[in-house]
Amino acid sequence: MTKSLLYIFILGAATACTKQELGKVLAEAYGKQLFDTELAMIVPEDATVEDSVFLTKEYINIWLSKQILLHKADKILTAQEKDKTKQLEQYNIDLLTYEVLNKLASQAVDTSYDEAELRDYYDEHTAEFELSQNIIKIIFFKIPNDARDIDMLWSSFKATDESIYSTLKQLSTLGGNYYEDKNSWVFFDDILKEIPINTYNQEHYLNNNKLIRLPDGDFEYFIRILDFRIRSSTSPFSIEKENIKQLLGMKRQQKAVQSIETKLVEEAYSNKEIKIF
């Protein structure tokens, strides 16, 4: 083998290895190639086949569109129009100043909140807290329908005899389920995923059902709806409490950012690190 042929062989092998490392070519435009390895950060590992195909197609279409526009820009824009150095420098400055101010503010902001402060904000801004779904407070037990004295248990449940809850919970562990947190609000839609309630009008159902004994195959549900609020009404404070913390946190952050920036400027002047001519 001559030296020239050996050189061509080595160069070809190196190119093949490089392309193999880059991955499989998915698209090409004006001499540029899109490799499947570039989609690794776009398509989640747990994505379904359908989602993966959809995201891949979307990314390829967007990539091709950008290449077409870049090619067109290269053809018709002047050198001055193509030069975005100043804009990029300003963008970088804006990003860095944003990052440093928010980091300093995060270190300075108090993230503890007094209950009264949260409640005051809720009371003053109730219009902001509108429910998008129906919510309920509920207790239910799913027990085998051949359970001993099931009719007696139902009578006691209807009579709000909580002394039988331990028995119902024990029965619920035999392939059933239960929920007895009577102080927490839950979305009615989430409950419908667990309990086979059939209704085309949730508001009407909630207004007309408080105690429900519902058969379901080899099981029965004992259900008590303690309270409910319909969509478009005011969301309860207990649900919005964490959201209010975030809102107040953002307000504190914004206030801290302004204060820190002013303080830094004053310190720089005081230390004669900056001056105006």
Image (cartoon, rainbow, N blue to C red):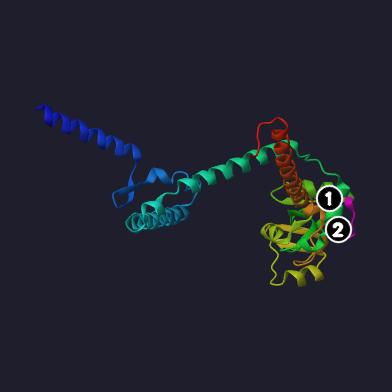
Establish if 158 lies above or below 106.
below
Q: In the image, what residue occupies the spot 71% across and 30% down?
A: 271
Find disc 2 in the rendering and name its residue.
123
Tell me the quadrant of the picture where the C terminus can be found: top right
Q: In the image, what residue occupies the spot 65% across and 39% down?
A: 276
Magenta run includes residue 155: yes
Tell me the quadrant of the picture where the N terminus can be found: top left
Q: Secondary structure at mark 2?
A: helix
**Residue 118 disc label:** 1
Establish if 267 lies above or below 255.
above
Name the residue at the left extreme. Answer: 2
Three-letter amino acid code at the position of disc 2: Asp
Q: Nearer the viewer, residue 141 or 99?
A: 99
Task: Name which quarter of the figure residue 69 lies in.
Answer: bottom left
Residue 170, image x and y in percent? Answer: 78, 46
Residue 14, image x and y in percent? Answer: 25, 33
Disc 2 from disc 1: Cα separation: 9 Å
Magenta-highlighted residues: 154-162
Three-letter amino acid code at the position of disc 1: Leu
